[in-house]
């Protein structure tokens, strides 16, 4: 089944009387357990798409269906409940990790609206398990972000995204700021998470090479439009 369905999605901005079609009638689908790469040059509309899929912005027209529900038809309360099922990982893990908080607090943060969330010792154990899941150590719970390398911080950001057991992960240039070796390690981690938890991934990047490494399908964006979509090999080999 399709976990994500984007239907005729448009987002226009008006600047000084000129309309910019940041996103122009984009339609795409992501099957459960698959990794879909969205590639395109800077300014092609990738971030605009990511924000709409995460319901951080509203479209000019069109729909984003998660498990069949159009996000933009949900009440604030329904949206909060739906949010547990999809999480986002950004390019710069440092700016999104609060330097004054321990790793435990940072990773547990998405649970703050959940009345049934584990507390105390149970929370610490849950965060410790997640740290091991992403290749860090359970003992890291009481450390601070600045004590970690860039790649380790991205692992912390991924652990935070995983704490609500999401079924869809939206990665917006999640490996772009990392050097090649670390990039590969993070891609391997994403593949492991897919294998172990069946998590679906929308992987947004300007880097075609990365898409080749992990994506099942690829959607190519240009000037706000989807210009090509298909199996990664076929799209990458096409002229
Ligand atoms: P990408 O992520 O592929 O670099 P974006 O989605 O950030 O592309 O941007 C797509 C287009 O929309 C660009 O032309 C950009 O300048 C424009 N744009 C994005 N956000 C805004 C905004 N808040 N106001 C006006 N124009 C915007
Ligand atoms: P861009 O690629 O357009 O420069 P960014 O990747 O910096 O955009 O951010 C994309 C959007 O996500 C922005 O609107 C920003 O406010 C929002 N954002 C960035 N970090 C977080 C975060 N940790 N939690 C929620 N929203 C965030």
Image (tube, grey):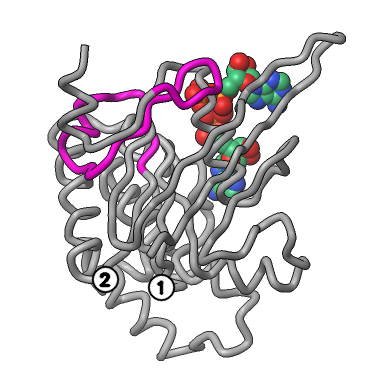
* Rendering coords of residue 196 (x, y %): 20, 70
Badge 1 marks a residue whose secondary structure is loop
Q: Mark 1 points at which residue?
A: 165
Q: Name the residue under label 2.
A: 197
Q: With 93 as the anchor, is 233 left or right in this view?
A: left
**Quadrant placement of the C terminus:** top left
Q: Which residue is drawn at 61% across and 80% down?
A: 114
3D distance between C-alphas at marks 2 and 1: 9 Å
Categorize mark 2 by other alpha carbons within 10 Å: few (<14), some (14-19), many (20+).
few
Task: State the residue at coordinates (51%, 88%).
Answer: 119
- Between 123 and 172, the one lying in front of the other is 172
Q: Where is residue 113 in the image (x, y as percent from the top left)?
A: 65, 75
Of the residues under marks 2 and 1, which one precedes in the sequence? 1
Quadrant in which the N terminus appears: bottom left
Is residue 7 part of the magenta span, yes or no?
no
Q: Which residue is drawn at 39% across and 82% down?
A: 124
Q: Quadrant of ligand 1?
A: top right
Q: What stretch is highlighted in magenta?
A: 203-227
Is residue 216 one of those drawn in magenta?
yes
């Amino acid at each position: 089944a399709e976990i994500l369905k984007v239907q005729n999605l448009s987002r226009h901005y008006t600047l000084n009387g000129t309309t910019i079609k940041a996103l122009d009638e984009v339609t795409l689908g992501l099957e459960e357990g698959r990794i879909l790469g969205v590639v395109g040059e800077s300014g092609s509309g990738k971030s605009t798409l990511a924000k709409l899929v995460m319901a951080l912005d509203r479209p000019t027209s069109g729909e984003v269906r998660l498990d069949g529900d159009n996000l933009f038809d949900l009440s604030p309360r329904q949206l909060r409940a739906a949010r547990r099922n999809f999480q986002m990982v950004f390019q710069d893990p440092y700016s999104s990790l609060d330097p004054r908080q321990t790793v435990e607090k940072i990773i547990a943060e998405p649970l703050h609206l959940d009345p049934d969330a584990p507390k105390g010792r149970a929370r610490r154990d849950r965060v410790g398990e997640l740290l091991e899941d992403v290749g860090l150590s359970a003992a890291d719970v009481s450390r601070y972000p600045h004590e970690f390398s860039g790649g380790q911080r991205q692992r912390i950001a991924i652990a935070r995204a995983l704490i609500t057991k999401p079924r869809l992960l939206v990665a917006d240039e999640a490996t772009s700021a990392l050097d090649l070796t670390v990039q590969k390690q993070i891609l391997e981690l994403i593949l492991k998470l897919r294998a172990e938890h069946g998590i679906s991934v929308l992987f947004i990047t300007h880097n075609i090479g990365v898409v080749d490494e992990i994506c099942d399908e690829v959607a190519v964006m240009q000037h706000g439009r989807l210009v090509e979509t298909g199996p990664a090999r076929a799209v990458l080999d096409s002229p």
